[in-house]
Amino acid sequence: MSLECTTEDCQNHTSTYLCGQCVTDLQAWLDKVPPLVESLNVTIAKLDNVRSAGGGGGGGSKPGSAAPLNLDAMQIQENLRGVSSDAKAYAHDERAAGIAWLIQDWATKAELLVSGPETETVNHAKIKERIQEAYGEPLPPREAIDYLRAKAKLSVKMFDFKNWVKHGHLPYVLDRVSTDDNARKIYYPGEVFRVAQQMRARRIKI
């Protein structure tokens, strides 16, 4: 049976959930995983040293400034350790496109962590602008769900959506356009996508 590749914006026909090109692309990311896991060991060790350096004095140092990044490195390393090495195996999973996106996201973050501490040349404003653009404009729940279905081919149930909000997993912003006292809550589609992938990652063994 001929299917359409589930990767966003890929319309190649395939007998699985990923076409041959997307399987090749995913395999290229998977091939990066073992060396990244090893490199993260060095990154974590270096960050530990940075965090403890000069700990005795109160001077101009920033105690604990490396701790959040350290935790990021350890979490990404743990995520990558659970990744399979065979892209073809993922192609038979109906969630293949989301899994591939998640693996690429982890690997990209690992590469940034391994590359070392950021320098003064980093354009934080530009990075923030790109993130906001990728996340889309905040929308009411149903519109955010419809947006993800159209743009990312990701189906989110309203029941799950409400649970994520209830348990504090999904952040919201208040609609400033609203004129009444009870401003409605709206959500960035990118945040909904991120939480959906995190929840699915908990339920499946990657």
Image: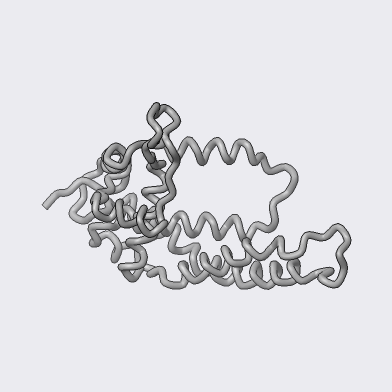
Residue at 62% in and 62% down: 68
Which of the pair 71/21 is nearer the observer?
71
Please identify the residue farthest to the front as the structure is shown.
Answer: 181
- Taking the image as shown, residue 65 lies to the left or right of residue 149, namely right
Quarter location, residue 90: bottom left
Does 67 sit above or below residue 109? Answer: below
Residue at 75% in and 45% down: 120
Does 202 sit above or below residue 125? Answer: below
Query: How far across and down, in percent of the image, does residue 132 sit?
Result: 50, 38
Which of the pair 19/105 is nearer the observer?
105
- Taking the image as shown, residue 125 lies to the left or right of residue 83, namely right
Quarter location, residue 49: bottom right
Quarter location, residue 123: top right
Quadrant of the frame with the C terminus:
bottom left
Residue at 43% in and 63% down: 30
- Taking the image as shown, residue 38 lies to the left or right of residue 64, namely left
Query: How far across and down, in percent of the image, does residue 33 sit?
Result: 49, 65
